[in-house]
Amino acid sequence: MKHQPFRQIIETHGVSWVLASLLAALAQFRMIGRVIGVQYQDSIAATRGVLDGLPHWQVFQSRVFGPWIVDMLTGLTGSFETAHMLYTITAYFLAGLAMLVVAHRHYGAKSAWIGFLSFQALCLILINSRWHYVWDGGELLTFTLFCHFVLAGKDWCWLAGLFALSVLNRESAFFIAAWMVLDPLLTAVLDKSLPRWPMIIAGLACLAAGAALTQFLRTTLLKREIGPDLFGMPELAGRSFHPHIQLNIDYLLDAFLLPTQEFNIVIVILLVLPLPLTVLLFRRLGRRYLSLGLAHGLIVLSLPIVGVLSETRVLFDLTPFMALGFAALCREDEGRPA
């Protein structure tokens, strides 16, 4: 079945998509305010810290995309706090709108709403009670576009462009570059064919350039990281890599053995869900989903090491894949190409 022309899709669904995405973004931001409360000011201060060269941790210093946009919006709003709120709402709005467009493009109109509602529900579940950094919303849009590029079979130019922007938002962009290297190799092994060298070379270039850019930003812009003094963690001062293995082991044990009203076992389920979801999608819809699950499998394996699972927003990278997976399993047109 041929896809509808993009203009026809916008004429048919554009108004409802915009309204739904805007209302959902406002609801998400209101929930952030309810869950985090006055501590949301700490997240705003963290954004200001990146701009001033005084981030909580030096690993934050290279995450300049969101803070730069907020700083530019301040000239429009007249208030840094208002600009921060506007950026966060806009990020959720664009991510929700992208989810509707991508899910419709691949699975049809009804599945688009399933993907959208799943996406919004997952975001609500993963809102953290302590932090919501300005770069968190950008992650949702980045990985929604990444899923689309993989499913649509886009060439290396699209993925390299996405990496170039997203690496300024957060280091999770390196999973995109890693996919550009690993997926052609996996495909070549499975098909017993030559790998796609342009994609591999572009991925290696993204890894090298991204690492150099990240280090340059941290070296050039950083004045002092304030987290070691602010949080009483002098042992983490000056590190560019923060392992959290023991902290996450304690979190996982508590989730299984000491259930509370937070019911953290749900977070554990969502953490591992992309792995069986990849297998199910691969068996039902083809190898493209094995390819897409490759990058998200790497994220699942890395989060218990470098992420703080109690800060549940670290699972945002997995949210678009899970939502699109639900939409794919509920697609109304069995003949639509996977």
Image: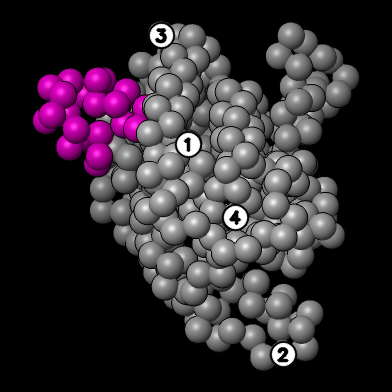
Stretch of the chain drawn in magenta: 68-90
Tell me the residue that label 1 is attached to.
96
The residue nearer to you, when weighing 226 against 104, is: 104
The local secondary structure at tag 4 comes to: helix
The structure residue drawn at horizontal position 65% and vertical position 72%, both measured from the top left corner, is: 183
Closer to the chain start, of discs 2 and 4, is 4
Where does the image place residue 27, in percent across and percent down from the top left? 46, 18
Tell me the residue that label 2 is attached to.
193
The residues bearing labels 3 and 4 have C-alpha atoms spaced at a distance of 41 Å
Closer to the chain start, of discs 3 and 4, is 3
Q: Quadrant of residue 138?
A: top left
Where does the image place residue 153, in percent across and percent down from the top left? 56, 69
The residues bearing labels 2 and 1 have C-alpha atoms spaced at a distance of 38 Å
The structure residue drawn at horizontal position 86% and vertical position 23%, both measured from the top left corner, is: 256
| Residue type indicated by callout 2 | Ser
Where is 248 relative to 242, above or below?
above
Mark linked to residue 106: 4
Q: Nearer the viewer, mark 2 or mark 1?
A: 1
Q: Nearer the viewer, mark 3 or mark 4?
A: 4
